[in-house]
Image: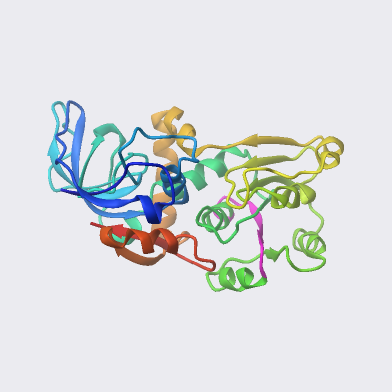
Amino acid sequence: MRALVHDEFGDPAEVLTVREVPVPEPGPGQVRVRLVLSPIHNHDLWTVRGTYGYKPTLPAVGGTEALGVVDALGEGVEHLSIGQRVVTGGTPGVWSEFFVASAAGLIPLPDGVPDEVAAQVVAMPFSAVSLLDSLGLEPRDWLVQNAANGAVGRLLAQLAPARGINVVGLVRRGAGVDELAGQGIGNVVATDEEGWRDRVAEITGGAPIIAGVDAVGGTASGDVMSVIAENGTLVVFGAMASPIMQIPSGDVIFKQAAVKGFWGSRVSATMAPDERARLMGEVFTRLREGVITLPVEATYSFDEIAAASRANFDAGRIGKVVLRP
Protein backbone atom coordinates (compact mmCIF):
# COMPACT_ATOMS: atom_id res chain seq x y z
CA MET A 1 0.00 0.00 0.00
CA ARG A 2 1.00 3.66 -0.35
CA ALA A 3 1.86 5.79 2.67
CA LEU A 4 3.39 9.19 3.43
CA VAL A 5 6.66 8.42 5.23
CA HIS A 6 9.51 10.53 6.61
CA ASP A 7 12.94 9.13 7.50
CA GLU A 8 14.09 12.32 9.23
CA PHE A 9 12.59 15.32 10.96
CA GLY A 10 12.37 18.48 8.89
CA ASP A 11 10.25 20.54 6.53
CA PRO A 12 7.21 18.38 5.69
CA ALA A 13 7.28 19.61 2.09
CA GLU A 14 10.76 18.14 1.77
CA VAL A 15 10.90 15.06 4.02
CA LEU A 16 7.47 13.47 3.46
CA THR A 17 7.44 11.09 0.48
CA VAL A 18 5.03 8.51 -0.92
CA ARG A 19 6.34 5.00 -0.33
CA GLU A 20 5.11 1.43 -0.73
CA VAL A 21 4.84 -0.29 2.66
CA PRO A 22 3.22 -3.56 3.83
CA VAL A 23 -0.49 -3.56 4.58
CA PRO A 24 -0.81 -3.87 8.39
CA GLU A 25 -2.72 -6.65 10.13
CA PRO A 26 -4.92 -5.83 13.16
CA GLY A 27 -4.04 -7.49 16.44
CA PRO A 28 -6.40 -8.29 19.33
CA GLY A 29 -8.64 -5.33 20.07
CA GLN A 30 -7.58 -3.56 16.89
CA VAL A 31 -9.22 -2.67 13.58
CA ARG A 32 -7.77 -2.13 10.13
CA VAL A 33 -9.29 0.92 8.48
CA ARG A 34 -9.24 1.95 4.82
CA LEU A 35 -8.52 5.67 4.66
CA VAL A 36 -11.05 7.96 2.97
CA LEU A 37 -9.95 11.45 4.04
CA SER A 38 -7.53 12.94 6.57
CA PRO A 39 -7.20 16.61 7.54
CA ILE A 40 -3.80 18.22 7.96
CA HIS A 41 -3.40 19.79 11.40
CA ASN A 42 -0.61 22.09 12.55
CA HIS A 43 0.45 19.49 15.11
CA ASP A 44 0.79 16.87 12.33
CA LEU A 45 3.35 19.06 10.56
CA TRP A 46 5.06 20.05 13.81
CA THR A 47 5.45 16.33 14.55
CA VAL A 48 7.12 15.81 11.17
CA ARG A 49 9.43 18.72 11.99
CA GLY A 50 10.26 17.13 15.35
CA THR A 51 9.08 20.17 17.30
CA TYR A 52 5.89 18.78 18.87
CA GLY A 53 5.42 17.22 22.29
CA TYR A 54 5.38 13.73 20.71
CA LYS A 55 8.25 12.37 18.62
CA PRO A 56 7.62 9.19 16.63
CA THR A 57 10.24 6.53 15.99
CA LEU A 58 11.68 6.92 12.48
CA PRO A 59 10.84 6.06 9.79
CA ALA A 60 7.31 7.24 10.55
CA VAL A 61 4.01 7.69 8.74
CA GLY A 62 2.35 11.07 9.27
CA GLY A 63 -1.15 12.11 10.27
CA THR A 64 -3.38 11.55 13.30
CA GLU A 65 -7.03 12.18 12.37
CA ALA A 66 -8.96 10.29 9.73
CA LEU A 67 -12.26 9.18 8.30
CA GLY A 68 -12.22 5.63 7.05
CA VAL A 69 -14.10 2.41 6.49
CA VAL A 70 -13.59 -0.68 8.65
CA ASP A 71 -11.68 -3.19 6.53
CA ALA A 72 -10.73 -5.98 8.98
CA LEU A 73 -11.41 -6.81 12.63
CA GLY A 74 -8.91 -8.08 15.15
CA GLU A 75 -9.70 -10.71 17.75
CA GLY A 76 -12.29 -9.65 20.31
CA VAL A 77 -13.71 -6.70 18.39
CA GLU A 78 -17.48 -7.07 18.38
CA HIS A 79 -18.97 -3.56 18.44
CA LEU A 80 -17.79 -2.63 14.93
CA SER A 81 -18.47 -4.24 11.56
CA ILE A 82 -16.69 -4.42 8.21
CA GLY A 83 -17.81 -1.62 5.90
CA GLN A 84 -18.78 0.71 8.75
CA ARG A 85 -17.67 4.36 8.56
CA VAL A 86 -15.55 5.40 11.54
CA VAL A 87 -13.38 8.32 12.62
CA THR A 88 -10.34 8.67 14.86
CA GLY A 89 -8.70 11.79 16.16
CA GLY A 90 -5.54 10.46 17.78
CA THR A 91 -4.09 7.55 15.82
CA PRO A 92 -0.51 8.16 14.63
CA GLY A 93 0.22 7.03 11.07
CA VAL A 94 -3.13 7.49 9.34
CA TRP A 95 -1.60 8.96 6.17
CA SER A 96 -1.60 5.56 4.50
CA GLU A 97 -4.12 3.69 2.39
CA PHE A 98 -4.79 1.39 5.36
CA PHE A 99 -3.99 1.91 9.03
CA VAL A 100 -4.51 -0.01 12.25
CA ALA A 101 -6.23 1.61 15.21
CA SER A 102 -7.46 0.60 18.63
CA ALA A 103 -11.10 -0.40 18.33
CA ALA A 104 -11.84 1.50 21.55
CA GLY A 105 -10.54 4.72 19.99
CA LEU A 106 -12.73 4.60 16.89
CA ILE A 107 -16.03 6.48 16.78
CA PRO A 108 -18.83 5.13 14.55
CA LEU A 109 -20.44 7.89 12.52
CA PRO A 110 -24.11 8.83 12.65
CA ASP A 111 -25.93 8.68 9.32
CA GLY A 112 -25.98 11.80 7.20
CA VAL A 113 -22.59 13.28 8.16
CA PRO A 114 -20.75 14.21 4.92
CA ASP A 115 -17.24 12.82 4.43
CA GLU A 116 -15.62 16.28 4.46
CA VAL A 117 -17.20 17.06 7.84
CA ALA A 118 -16.68 13.61 9.31
CA ALA A 119 -12.96 13.66 8.51
CA GLN A 120 -12.38 16.58 10.88
CA VAL A 121 -15.06 16.03 13.50
CA VAL A 122 -12.83 14.70 16.28
CA ALA A 123 -9.51 16.50 16.82
CA MET A 124 -10.35 20.20 16.53
CA PRO A 125 -14.02 20.13 17.62
CA PHE A 126 -13.24 17.86 20.55
CA SER A 127 -10.24 19.98 21.55
CA ALA A 128 -12.42 23.09 21.37
CA VAL A 129 -15.30 21.68 23.41
CA SER A 130 -13.03 20.09 26.02
CA LEU A 131 -11.00 23.32 26.31
CA LEU A 132 -14.21 25.29 26.74
CA ASP A 133 -15.46 22.78 29.31
CA SER A 134 -12.20 22.99 31.28
CA LEU A 135 -12.55 26.75 31.78
CA GLY A 136 -15.52 26.31 34.11
CA LEU A 137 -17.29 29.38 32.75
CA GLU A 138 -20.91 30.20 33.52
CA PRO A 139 -23.57 31.68 31.23
CA ARG A 140 -22.94 35.40 30.56
CA ASP A 141 -19.23 35.10 31.44
CA TRP A 142 -16.69 36.56 28.99
CA LEU A 143 -13.80 34.76 27.30
CA VAL A 144 -11.10 36.28 25.07
CA GLN A 145 -9.03 34.32 22.55
CA ASN A 146 -6.40 35.07 19.95
CA ALA A 147 -6.08 33.18 16.64
CA ALA A 148 -9.83 33.69 16.42
CA ASN A 149 -9.70 32.80 12.72
CA GLY A 150 -7.94 29.49 13.37
CA ALA A 151 -9.79 26.17 13.43
CA VAL A 152 -10.15 25.97 17.21
CA GLY A 153 -10.80 29.71 17.44
CA ARG A 154 -13.76 29.51 15.06
CA LEU A 155 -15.14 26.49 16.87
CA LEU A 156 -14.85 28.13 20.29
CA ALA A 157 -16.69 31.17 18.93
CA GLN A 158 -19.48 28.87 17.75
CA LEU A 159 -19.64 26.49 20.72
CA ALA A 160 -19.43 29.02 23.56
CA PRO A 161 -22.59 31.02 22.71
CA ALA A 162 -24.54 27.76 22.63
CA ARG A 163 -23.64 27.52 26.33
CA GLY A 164 -24.51 31.18 26.91
CA ILE A 165 -20.83 32.20 27.14
CA ASN A 166 -19.62 35.40 25.45
CA VAL A 167 -16.46 35.46 23.33
CA VAL A 168 -14.17 38.25 22.13
CA GLY A 169 -11.87 37.15 19.32
CA LEU A 170 -8.49 38.69 18.53
CA VAL A 171 -6.89 38.52 15.08
CA ARG A 172 -3.63 40.03 13.89
CA ARG A 173 -4.98 41.87 10.84
CA GLY A 174 -8.14 43.71 9.90
CA ALA A 175 -8.94 41.33 7.05
CA GLY A 176 -9.48 38.59 9.63
CA VAL A 177 -12.41 40.52 11.09
CA ASP A 178 -14.16 40.52 7.71
CA GLU A 179 -13.36 36.85 7.08
CA LEU A 180 -15.02 35.83 10.35
CA ALA A 181 -17.96 38.17 9.83
CA GLY A 182 -18.58 36.33 6.58
CA GLN A 183 -18.97 33.15 8.64
CA GLY A 184 -21.38 34.76 11.06
CA ILE A 185 -18.78 35.27 13.80
CA GLY A 186 -18.75 38.70 15.43
CA ASN A 187 -17.09 40.43 18.40
CA VAL A 188 -13.71 40.21 16.66
CA VAL A 189 -10.97 42.83 17.05
CA ALA A 190 -7.76 43.29 15.04
CA THR A 191 -4.74 43.95 17.26
CA ASP A 192 -2.92 45.83 14.50
CA GLU A 193 -5.41 48.68 14.85
CA GLU A 194 -4.86 51.57 17.24
CA GLY A 195 -7.11 51.51 20.30
CA TRP A 196 -8.01 47.84 19.97
CA ARG A 197 -8.18 47.38 23.76
CA ASP A 198 -10.81 50.14 23.92
CA ARG A 199 -12.76 48.26 21.28
CA VAL A 200 -12.62 45.09 23.44
CA ALA A 201 -13.97 47.05 26.43
CA GLU A 202 -16.73 48.45 24.22
CA ILE A 203 -17.78 44.96 23.14
CA THR A 204 -17.89 43.60 26.69
CA GLY A 205 -19.55 46.71 28.09
CA GLY A 206 -16.87 46.77 30.75
CA ALA A 207 -17.74 43.30 32.06
CA PRO A 208 -14.73 41.35 33.41
CA ILE A 209 -13.09 38.87 31.06
CA ILE A 210 -12.70 35.76 33.20
CA ALA A 211 -10.46 33.67 30.95
CA GLY A 212 -8.22 33.98 27.93
CA VAL A 213 -6.94 31.44 25.41
CA ASP A 214 -3.55 31.90 23.74
CA ALA A 215 -2.70 29.87 20.64
CA VAL A 216 -0.07 32.22 19.20
CA GLY A 217 2.72 32.95 21.69
CA GLY A 218 5.16 35.86 21.50
CA THR A 219 3.73 39.30 22.18
CA ALA A 220 0.24 37.97 21.39
CA SER A 221 0.29 36.18 24.76
CA GLY A 222 0.73 39.52 26.49
CA ASP A 223 -2.07 41.02 24.41
CA VAL A 224 -4.51 38.44 25.74
CA MET A 225 -3.29 38.83 29.31
CA SER A 226 -3.64 42.61 29.07
CA VAL A 227 -7.44 42.42 28.77
CA ILE A 228 -8.06 39.61 31.27
CA ALA A 229 -9.66 40.69 34.56
CA GLU A 230 -8.21 40.38 38.06
CA ASN A 231 -7.95 36.75 39.20
CA GLY A 232 -8.43 35.66 35.59
CA THR A 233 -6.80 32.68 33.89
CA LEU A 234 -4.73 32.51 30.70
CA VAL A 235 -4.82 29.07 29.09
CA VAL A 236 -2.05 28.31 26.60
CA PHE A 237 -3.22 26.09 23.76
CA GLY A 238 -0.61 26.63 21.05
CA ALA A 239 2.37 28.62 19.81
CA MET A 240 1.77 29.37 16.15
CA ALA A 241 4.02 32.45 16.07
CA SER A 242 6.59 31.78 18.79
CA PRO A 243 7.39 29.16 21.45
CA ILE A 244 8.27 32.03 23.82
CA MET A 245 5.44 33.85 25.60
CA GLN A 246 6.05 37.55 26.23
CA ILE A 247 3.87 38.61 29.17
CA PRO A 248 4.60 41.67 31.34
CA SER A 249 5.13 40.48 34.90
CA GLY A 250 3.00 43.34 36.20
CA ASP A 251 -0.10 41.95 34.50
CA VAL A 252 0.42 38.60 36.18
CA ILE A 253 1.33 39.99 39.61
CA PHE A 254 -1.14 42.81 40.03
CA LYS A 255 -4.02 40.90 38.47
CA GLN A 256 -3.07 37.81 40.49
CA ALA A 257 -3.62 35.95 37.24
CA ALA A 258 -2.96 32.27 36.58
CA VAL A 259 -1.26 30.83 33.49
CA LYS A 260 -1.70 27.16 32.62
CA GLY A 261 -1.36 24.86 29.64
CA PHE A 262 -3.89 22.73 27.78
CA TRP A 263 -2.76 19.77 25.66
CA GLY A 264 -5.79 18.22 23.98
CA SER A 265 -4.15 14.84 23.37
CA ARG A 266 -3.27 14.41 27.04
CA VAL A 267 -6.67 15.64 28.20
CA SER A 268 -8.46 13.20 25.88
CA ALA A 269 -6.24 10.27 26.88
CA THR A 270 -6.98 10.74 30.59
CA MET A 271 -10.66 11.65 30.28
CA ALA A 272 -13.29 9.27 31.64
CA PRO A 273 -15.24 7.49 28.86
CA ASP A 274 -18.59 8.92 29.97
CA GLU A 275 -17.13 12.44 29.96
CA ARG A 276 -15.71 11.93 26.47
CA ALA A 277 -19.08 10.63 25.26
CA ARG A 278 -20.85 13.65 26.77
CA LEU A 279 -18.58 16.13 25.00
CA MET A 280 -18.63 14.29 21.65
CA GLY A 281 -22.40 14.20 21.97
CA GLU A 282 -22.37 17.97 22.29
CA VAL A 283 -20.24 18.25 19.15
CA PHE A 284 -22.62 16.09 17.09
CA THR A 285 -25.62 17.98 18.45
CA ARG A 286 -24.12 21.33 17.45
CA LEU A 287 -23.32 19.93 13.99
CA ARG A 288 -26.93 18.81 13.50
CA GLU A 289 -28.15 22.20 14.66
CA GLY A 290 -25.82 23.97 12.24
CA VAL A 291 -24.15 25.80 15.13
CA ILE A 292 -20.65 24.69 14.18
CA THR A 293 -19.25 24.45 10.67
CA LEU A 294 -16.25 22.49 9.41
CA PRO A 295 -15.36 23.84 5.95
CA VAL A 296 -12.70 22.34 3.67
CA GLU A 297 -10.36 24.73 1.86
CA ALA A 298 -8.87 22.18 -0.55
CA THR A 299 -8.29 18.46 -1.01
CA TYR A 300 -4.92 17.08 -2.13
CA SER A 301 -3.70 13.60 -3.01
CA PHE A 302 -0.76 11.92 -1.27
CA ASP A 303 1.35 12.78 -4.32
CA GLU A 304 0.67 16.48 -3.67
CA ILE A 305 1.83 16.47 -0.04
CA ALA A 306 4.44 19.22 -0.59
CA ALA A 307 1.82 21.64 -1.90
CA ALA A 308 -0.68 20.52 0.75
CA SER A 309 1.71 21.11 3.65
CA ARG A 310 2.53 24.59 2.36
CA ALA A 311 -1.15 25.40 1.82
CA ASN A 312 -1.85 24.58 5.47
CA PHE A 313 -0.11 27.79 6.52
CA ASP A 314 -1.62 30.09 3.89
CA ALA A 315 -2.81 33.37 5.41
CA GLY A 316 -6.56 33.83 5.17
CA ARG A 317 -7.30 30.13 4.80
CA ILE A 318 -10.86 29.48 6.02
CA GLY A 319 -11.26 25.69 5.85
CA LYS A 320 -9.04 22.69 6.48
CA VAL A 321 -6.59 21.25 3.98
CA VAL A 322 -7.51 17.59 3.52
CA LEU A 323 -5.60 14.59 2.14
CA ARG A 324 -6.94 11.65 0.16
CA PRO A 325 -4.91 8.55 -0.77
Asked if the magenta segment contains residue 162, the reply would be: yes
* Rendered image quadrant of residue 7: top left
Can I make out residue 282 in this image? no
The residue under the point 75% across, 63% down is 203
Q: Answer left or right for 262 relative to 253.
A: left
Q: Position of residue 5 (x, y in %)?
A: 29, 46
Closer to the camera in the image, 20 or 297 = 20
Q: In which quarter of the image is the C terminus?
A: bottom left
Residue 84 percent across, percent down from the top left: 18, 47
- Residue at 60% x, 49% y is 215
Q: Is residue 196 left or right of residue 180?
A: right
Q: Which x, y percent locates residue 132?
A: 57, 44
Q: Which residue is drawn at 58% across and 66% down?
A: 185
Left or right: residue 128 compared with residue 301:
right
Percent coordinates x, y for residue 18 in the rendering:
25, 53
Say if the magenta span includes residue 80. no
Q: Is residue 5 visible?
A: yes
Residue at 73%, 63% (x, y): give it. Answer: 191
**Which contiguous range is marked in magenta?**
161-173
How many numbered markers are drawn? 0
Indicate whether 209 appears above or below 100.
below
Asked where in the image residue 179 lies, by quadrant, the reply is: bottom right
Work out whether residue 302 or residue 151 is closer to the camera in this orientation and state it.
302
Colour theme? rainbow
